[in-house]
Each structure stands twice: as C-alpha cells, then as structure tokens.
Amino acid sequence: MEDLKLLRQTVERLAGEMPVTDMHTHLYAPEFGKLLLWGVDELLIYHYLISESFRWSDQEYDDFWSMSKKEQADLIWKTLFIDHSPVSEATRGFITILRRLGLDVSSRNLDDYRKAFETRTVKEHVDTVMQIAGVQKIVMTNDPFDELERPVWMSGEGKKDPRFYAALRVDALLNNWPFAVKELQKLGYAVEETWSEGTKDEVRRFLKEWIVRMDALYLAVSMPGDFTYPAEHHRSVMIDEVMIPVCQEQGIPFALMIGVRRNANPSLRLAGDMSMSSDVSAVEALCRRYPEQKFIVTMLARGNQHELAVLARKFRNLMIFGCWWFLNIDSIVEEMTRFRVELLGTSMIPIHSDCRVFEQLIYKWEYSRAIIGRVLADKYEKLHLSGWRVTEEEIRRDLDDMYNRNFWRFIGRE
Ligand code: HDL
Ligand code: ZN
C-alpha cells in the first residue's frame, strides 16, 4: 500500500505546483494602469463579497455606493469577517491570500494588512502573486469600447508583457446592438441599427482590426440563458454573418459563456447578475453547422453541466472550460471535475479563475489544484489497483494537458 500512498502524494504535489495558463480572467497587465485591481480594499469590495455582505445589512444600497472604497472595505470586513465567520468561498479566499502572502492572519488587524501591501510596487507584486499561485500565463478580457482600455492598445502598450494575452470581448454586439451601434459610430465605423451589407462589412472590419491589434487568442461573448440558435434574432444574424466568418478568417475560436441574467438586482450593480438555465442545443446546433469552427464554451447553471459535458463527447470542435462564477466553489468544482474526467478523460479545461483582483489568483488556484489533484489521484488509484501503473511523466503530461496544452493546442498556438 506504500506505493498507493506515494502515488497520491505525487499526484497531489504535481497538481499543486505545475504552472498553469489561466484562460479567462478580468485581470490586466501592469501596463493597463488602474484597470489592474490589487490590494486589500479592492479584494474586500470584490462584487462577490458585496452581495454576501448585503445579506446581513439593511443599509440603503445608495448609502453603500456613496461610501469610499476604504469605508466599503471596512464595512465588509466587519460584516463578513468579524461579525460572522468567513466560511464562504470568497471570504475564506481573502484569508488564504493573507496567509500565502505571509501576513499574520490571527491579528485580524485590517490596517496592518493594508500597511503590508503598501510596501509593494505593482510590478513586483504581480510577479510575487503569479509565482505563489503558479500562474505562468494570463488571458485578459479586453473591450475596445472601454474608454480606459482602448488608449493602451492604440499606444501599443497592451502587448508589452509577454505573460498576458488578450481575448476580444464584445457582448454588446450580441446583447445590446443599439448601444454597440453608437459605440462603433464613435470609433468611425459606418454602421446603422438596421442590418445591411454595409453594416455587416463594417462590424467585420471592427472585429478584424481589433483581433489583429490585440493579437486576440479568441473572440468571447457572454449571453443570457435564453440564447437560442438558430433563431429569428439579431444574435443569429450577428453570429452567422459576422462572428463565424471573422473567426474562420482569423483562425481563432469563438468563446461562448452562456447563462447569465444581467442586473437581476440593479441596485447591486456588478454584483446584481443572476444565473439561469441555458439551452445546450444552441451550442449543439453551432458545433454541427460549423464543424471547422472551434468553440470554447462554459455555462453558468449547474443543471446544464452534465449535458454540456456529454455534448463535448459528440463534437471535437467543442472545448468546454471552467467552473464559471457561482460554480467556482469547492463542492461544485469537485462534482464537475469528477464527471468531466469520467466522461471526457483529460480532454477538457477543468478550471479558470475569472479573477478580477490580482491576488485572487492565489486562493482560486490553490483550491482548484487541490480538487483536481484529489480527483486525478482517485482515478489513478483505481487504475493502479487494476494493475495499470501511471508514471510520474504521465501524471505530468495529463496535468499539463488540462492546465495548459488543451487550451493552447485547441487555439492552434501550441
Ligand atoms: O461575464 C463574465 O465574464 C463573468 O465572469 C462576469 O465578469 C462576472 O461578473 C464575474 O466576475 N464572474 O466571476
Ligand atoms: Zn468572466
């Protein structure tokens, strides 16, 4: 039984330390200035914690929003950490960050933590956090309509840090076309709200120009769960006439993130979005109609996950990824990783962080690595008991596939 113990230790050690590619985040390279969020106050006003803290509060939403970031952070700290134990994923994550950064968690002194962060420059902090989390490559979420972000790309600064990659995110083209038309017109594209050949060509030009400018690894959009395809709907026209042709011409995947209902509680702002069931047959129809187009897909509702994994067995141009947003909690990451391995082996991307604040990489990857290691160790143990001996090299290969190579191979950049 010694060799079984050694096997588990080896798998869990390698799962814990192998460098990863984080293929969907809301982080930015230091060149993006204040778009890169980091530090104690940003960590505490993470929108996940804002919604959790309001569960204990009868404070007027607008009163909260009128407070300074420090005041909001102090209130969230008191509510979720002092008045109640930080046992949720996002609250416990903050404690994990403090621990892994070597701070005295038992002090519970928020100002001490703030002081400790003040001694760091952004660049050295980014290096430290990526080293602790074992994250070697980060894919950002990039929006040409963002007034702060656009100048960084126009100046060429966006591509400076080789560890950071772009994903071109254009939700408005699919979900808020009237707004997108105005933004495109401001940027000099001759588009009209009424669909025409001219408008189609100009939206294609917009996407092509930004894919090239960013060297975008994929085109990404999130959509509500009521997304159906094919449909007599603007989304179908935009997908068929613009997104697929441009992705095929540029040779990049189309990433669909489906199942969010934006602004279920508008008073919570970014924290007010809700999960909703989605129609997996829409993804099936796209994969079947465009067998040469690669699709990277994640869904938000727990109830869609098994069906989506089964669909991935049917279409090799479908790569499912991550435990998105409200699914990124230990119990569901374990459940999803287990049945994905059981249905797909190691041919999927088990996790992404979706981080918004830089230090979150530390806890999100620590928690996921532990689960992936545990699941793989269970599977290798069963093989071992059948007489199949996995080597350390094979364990490394399997982890590298799930942590890195499935993504880079699928997007054609390995
Ligand atoms: O649409 C998305 O990419 C989601 O990840 C949202 O950004 C969401 O607010 C989030 O941060 N989830 O983790
Ligand atoms: Zn996201």
Image (cartoon, helix red, strand yellow):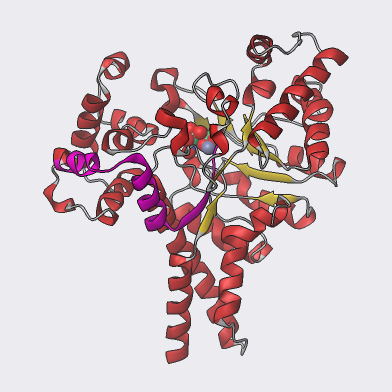
Q: Position of residue 98 (x, y in %)?
A: 25, 50
Q: Residue at x 58, y 83 (%)?
A: 391
Would residue 1 be seen by someone viewing this image from the given angle?
A: no
In the depicted view, which residue is nearer to us: 3 or 38? 38
Query: Vertical placement of 15 versus 48: above or below?
Result: below
**Residue 140: within the magenta?**
yes
Q: Quadrant of residue 200?
A: top right
Q: Which residue is drawn at 44% across and 84% down?
A: 6
Query: Vertical placement of 245 versus 399: above or below?
Result: above
Q: Position of residue 89 (x, y in %)?
A: 36, 47
Q: Which residue is drawn at 18% across and 52% down?
A: 105
Considering the image in quadrants, where does the C terminus appear? bottom right
Left or right, 183 with reference to 253: left
Q: Give the range drawn in magenta.
A: 112-141
Q: Position of residue 261 (x, y in %)?
A: 55, 27
Q: Quadrant of residue 110?
A: top left
How would you classify the magenta stretch by its main secondary structure? helix
Would residue 341 be seen by someone viewing this image from the given angle?
A: yes
In the depicted view, which residue is nearer to us: 222 or 129? 129
Considering the image in quadrants, where does the N terminus appear? bottom left
